[in-house]
Amino acid sequence: MRREEGKGGVSSHRRLWYNHSAMHTNPRQLAITILCQRQETGQPVDLLRDNLLQKVLPANPKDTQLVTALVFGVLRWQRYLDAILQSFSSHPLAKMKNLTLQALRVGLFQLCFMDRIPASAAVNETVKALKESRQPGWLTGFVNGLLRNIARQLDTLPNPWDNDLPPAVRLSHPDWLYQRWLARYGEKAATSICLANNRQASLVLRVNAKRLEREDFLRELDKNGITARPGLYCPEAVVLPDYRGDIAALPGYGNGAFMVQDEGAQLISLLLGPFGSGKYLDACAGLGGKTMHLAQLIPDGSQVVAIEPHPLRCKLLRENSTRMGLADRISCRQTELADLEDNAGDLFAAILVDAPCSGLGVIRRQPDIRWNRNEDDLPRYQAVQLKLLSQAAALLAPGGTLVYATCSSEPEENEEVVAQFLAAQPRFALSSPPFFPEAARRLINSSGFFQTRPDATLDGFFAARLVRSKG
């Protein structure tokens, strides 16, 4: 088998199977703990990882990187790993304790996908993590024996790149999602999307044009020995294909030289142009990636009102605006869009609705999303999206621009939402962006929507530019 780097029963969440002193030196135990918590709580894995690493610091930065590589790697290849495990185990995976199953996944992922870790170390360190978690000898012996048996037969395992397993299994996606993409795109494109989702994405930054030029930032990265190149589509994008370290350790972070943002997300802000004087609204600001970009694009004297109801995200939004030197251009409000609608004063020249969605276009960066979603979620998201668009429409000035965006690949959240909105709002019409980077114009499809699919350079985004009539 080619190796590349790159549900069971749930035990009680109240039973702690780890201790902080042991976890300080064993990244496998950290990874297993994060995966167990994700299975039990359904919380986003990056949040669980960050919370745990703040409490228990690994011995060195490389250990931190290994924790992330193990957690995200297991989630990317979980279904494939489970198929291999079940073919070797006499005990059904569905009846295993959560801790046991996650440990087996972590061990097998190292064997199958991490060439730099010797097979003996992959097995020994995984078993050691279980022992440090005070698991009984029979259980650690079971895990040890199963992983060693697989290690002896690695060359005989079905390869995730051949056809020895059903497509959705070897590509490690839920059946419902693979079948959707197969019906819509065909086998070749569906396979390509799944494979893109299973690759580690490059880090993409957007340079703060208010602070420095992209070329100056690239030179600064080069001086620090960091490989970087300009983005393919956006004039402020910088791609770091090999960087795996702490974002805050990059040169210029503290001075607001950049924000982390995929090129597809950077392009969405540009759809709001041309940027004249006035008030702009980011109706679903989150941590403020698009808010900051919009604040850079508008002329002096203009302002962005950023709506974010969640207290922690709103706090981080304010911190980001200060770090980027844009606090004077951004008014952060911890409230719901409906509250703004009820107290509407002056109307906005342009509004961005980067709506809550399934996130099925950004599985590459958030691999747990594929296991947290099902087909029944899509109508629920659609109802929320239509409500937000209706609320935003009431706040837009005549002749203004409303951009609706998601990080979803699914029509229910994209084309269908726009169609229903336009049917209910006759004063609005779909519009092509008057100013857009030439390299990115191919990303506007024949229906007039901005749409990307996950590939080597982009995540999956959708956006529609809607203009309100002046009358």
Image (spheres, rainbow, N blue to C red):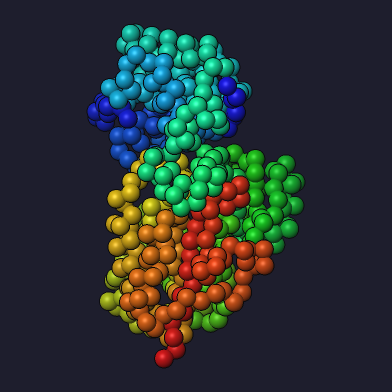
Q: Position of residue 470 (x, y in %)?
A: 44, 89
- Quadrant housing residue 130: top left
- Quadrant housing residue 235: bottom right
Comparing 160 with 347, the one in front is 160
Q: Position of residue 159 (x, y in %)?
A: 54, 26
Residue 90 vertical placement versus 381 (above, below): above
Comparing 186 with 117, the one in front is 186
Q: Is residue 315 left or right of residue 231?
A: left
Quadrant, the C terminus: bottom left
Can residue 284 be seen here? Answer: no
Quadrant, the N terminus: top right
Q: Is residue 11 left or right of residue 465?
A: left
Q: Residue at x 50, y 57 (%)?
A: 461
Comparing 315 with 367, the one in front is 367
Q: Residue at x 41, y 80 (%)?
A: 428
Q: Position of residue 186 (x, y in %)?
A: 50, 48
Residue 440 vertical placement versus 252 (above, below): below
Q: How many marks?
A: 0
Q: Position of residue 41 (x, y in %)?
A: 30, 38
Q: Of all residues shown, which one is farthest toward the bottom?
A: 471
Q: Residue at x 32, y 77 (%)?
A: 424
Residue 151 vertical placement versus 186 (above, below): above
Can residue 159 be seen here? Answer: yes
Q: Residue at x 46, y 85 (%)?
A: 399
